[in-house]
Image (cartoon, grey):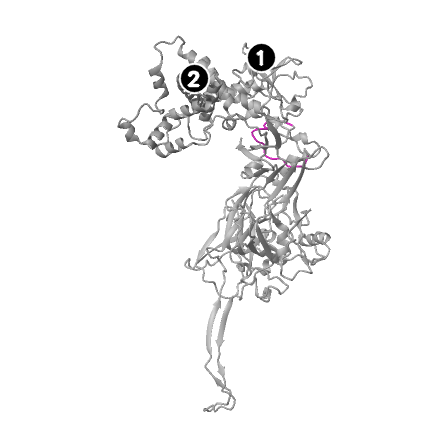
Amino acid sequence: MAHHFTESRPPLLVDLRDQRLPAAETGDYEAELAHRWAPAAGADAGSGTAPGEYPLTPVTHSFTVTAARRCLPPDAVHTVNPPDGASGLYHGVLPHITLSRASLPWDRALSSSRSVPFTEDSGTPRTPWLALLVFAAGELPADPGAEGLRLRHTRTAGTRPAREEVQRPDLEGGDADEDAWYTIDVPPDVFTKVAPRLEELRYLAHSRIVRTVKSAAPWYGRREELREGTFAVVLGNRLPRGDGRYVAHLVSLEGWEKRLPPADAGDKPLRLFSLHAWTFGNRPAASRAGFEQTLRDLVRCAEQDPHRLDLVLHASGKKANTPGADTPLSSDPWPPSGRLKHGYVPVRYQTHSGEVMPAWYRGPLTPFTPKPLPTPDGGGARRFRSAEQCHIFIDEQGVFDISYAAAWSLGRALALADPELAAQVDRARTHGWEDLRAAAAYLRLHPRADREALARHLESRSGPARFASVLRQGLLEHLAGGDRTDDGDDPAATAAAHSPATDARPAHGRLLSAWREPRVREVIRTRMARTLVPAEVDEYTQDLSLLCPPAPEDDLDAYVPAGTGLTWPALLPRVPFCYLVPDRGMLLDPVPPAGRPQSCPGPLDDGFEGLGRDGLRLFTVDADWLKCLQDGALSVGIGTALDEELTDGLSQALPVSTTPLTGLLLSTRLLSDYPDLIVEASGTTAALRRDMTGDVLMMLFAGVPGSLTFREPGHGIHFGSAGSPDRPAIGLRRCTVRESIHKGTPDPGNGQVFGTKLTLDDTHLRTPVSGGRLREVLDLGSGTKNGTGLLSDLSTELRKKQHHGDTFPDTLSPGQFALQLLRSPLTLDLTRRTKDGDPR
């Protein structure tokens, strides 16, 4: 099978800009309004002033432009990522905060020396005064558990203590008007290793413009709501690759220009204003892989051999277990056989005589389309009446195939264990008895009645239907003594009035004889099947439902609420997982190559050495296995020969799907991280989706799919790296400007993935913080053409990818850098290949 990854793009146009400057800088302003007028030429001014100069008194108005300084307005934060309080696999997520005010990071100048002209086309992006610092547990002395603890300050808290061993920012101007604010104290060594360098600050903030595409499908994203508008985004510079908790603080760096790396941070803690904070936890990453890597490992085994995705027990020398038991076989008595390739496993089988012997077992999920199962005694479409009738003896091996016998016994056990299922079977058979008595009585009066006439009389005699009909015809007229000899009278009562005084045949014999007439059997078994699988509700049942819908357990009529059918869609979800997959090794792939992380162990792979942790299996559903399961459930409550006959008719009348059923089993811890994982199959309709356990998903499809699609749930827009925790990488995207396109107009080709990645090495990451073993803080470098660091390497790789007619600057802009870090939901397409190798 061929596979390839693509992006799932939202129906939105997202434009990343370098900055969004405010209309005016903070400070005190004065506006002066003056008027001057002059008389027309040659007119007499009539005053002592010179002609043409008649000034009025100027009007002056003073005002002040302010901006947030120590705290944010309540509605300033649009969203954060990772979510506050979340715990997950975030080794590839670069923490960031989205602000509702698009110009907020540039409302203030970092310092007077960093003030640039207030024009977005000045060519030099303004350095933002905000930064997002990410700390791990144990790095902040006042918050050792990374719980988001901060020191609260108010205007009424009193005077400052005389001696505080902290450094404060060098702020110009007076204090803002905030009543309360928060601070954190950062040790100098931690600040030096975590804070961005002065030249890196401008690349960690950008603005975002989101526009909706017309006639686009709705976007159901997780975590961050994508909506139209203009926002500001502040990125962190630390990938949380370590295990444990992290806390992110949006801090003000105004007044800290002289302390930013690589400058000396001093010898005292730095007291920073914390404008917003949230916490998150990174799960153990040493044994887990991300979405893309996990799916690649799942399908890699099928690149050369597509049968590796079959639901079979691959030869591995392991012992098999019996369905529902954990006792392995003590030896391996099986000669080389192709039955393993057909989905069979060896099991321990105990006969009714008590003898223990090996046998073959296969569940309803098979890797091939099985041959039709012969009916018992060549009896046409008759049902299997016992488990023994489902046994298959293999002469060349001298053992039994108990697959269908186990299905029959399981169906019977399910019906006995569930009173509702047993009651449905008994209700259908009871309705058959009642209809058969009425049909026998009617045929004694009308021996030549055809099937249609018999069906009409059986429909009119049912209690609820008769009651609704009487209501329509007029209940009072019937109660007042209307005609009681019309065709609506009870056929059984009319037959009793005209019956002979004696009848040599017993009642049971008469009913059995009536049943064996084709016209009677066809009508009655259809009505019995409608009890279990209600057809389209007719007008009588609709009238009844408007009055008083009866409870299913108390209804004596053949009509029951829809959805209570006893067909395989109702039975299959009740089948224990060990009957569907008899050996846990059928789901798991071999151990991936050394050095590749595996998922955490799950309940299906404990004790299976030499096997991996994930697996994807494709199968076909054996309709005969489901038929035996259904026959076993129908066998409950049979007491007489007529019960057997009625049950045979009921089994034949239940609907049988002519469309082949196929499906997949996905066993991976990825389902715990993505419970809303989207799985689609082309050319089919989903028949059933069932979460077997927290790590196993089963899906059934009506038809044979041409391709399978696995979609990562939409997660809005986030930034970060791709790849495994040990080898983070950045996927390269096209971000050039065509000369033929007017400046400022977005290029529709920008943002497309090239398919290559830049692996982050030691030159792109700073030394570990506080003695940690992992490099997490990005080293962007100077950003010049001949510089070193992430910006320089990204620019070099992107210039190699530029198309003809594209121009690319020597260094990335903040918006272009954010575009390289952008992560979109991924889509994996699996395509079947024909014998000639072409995908289909």
Which quadrant does the C terminus fall into?
Answer: top right
Q: CA distance from mark 2 to mark 1?
A: 57 Å
Give me the residue at 47% from left, 59% from top. Answer: 162
Residue 292: quarter of image: top right
Q: Position of residue 744 (x, y in %)?
A: 62, 61
- Residue at the far top in the pictured view: 504
Residue 156 position by quadrant: bottom left
Pointer 1: what residue? 356
Residue 598 x, y percent position in the rendering: 62, 35
In this rendering, would 618 be left or right of 642? Answer: right
Q: Which mark is nearer the camera, 2 or 1?
A: 2
Indicate whether 624 appears above or below 71: above
Callout 1 amino acid? Val
The one of 564 and 408 positioned closer to us in this rendering = 564
Residue closest to the eye, 290 or 10: 10
Please tell me which residue lies in front, 22 or 7: 7
- Looking at the picture, which amino acid does disc 2 mark? Pro
Residue matched to label 2? 447
Q: Residue at x 48, y 18 (%)?
A: 647
Q: Magenta stretch: residue 11 in it?
A: no
Q: Is residue 55 visible?
A: yes
Q: In what element is the residue under mark 1? A: strand
Tag 2 near tag 1, CB within 8 Å: no
Query: Dot 2 surroundings within 10 Å: few (below 14), some, or many (20 or more)?
Result: few
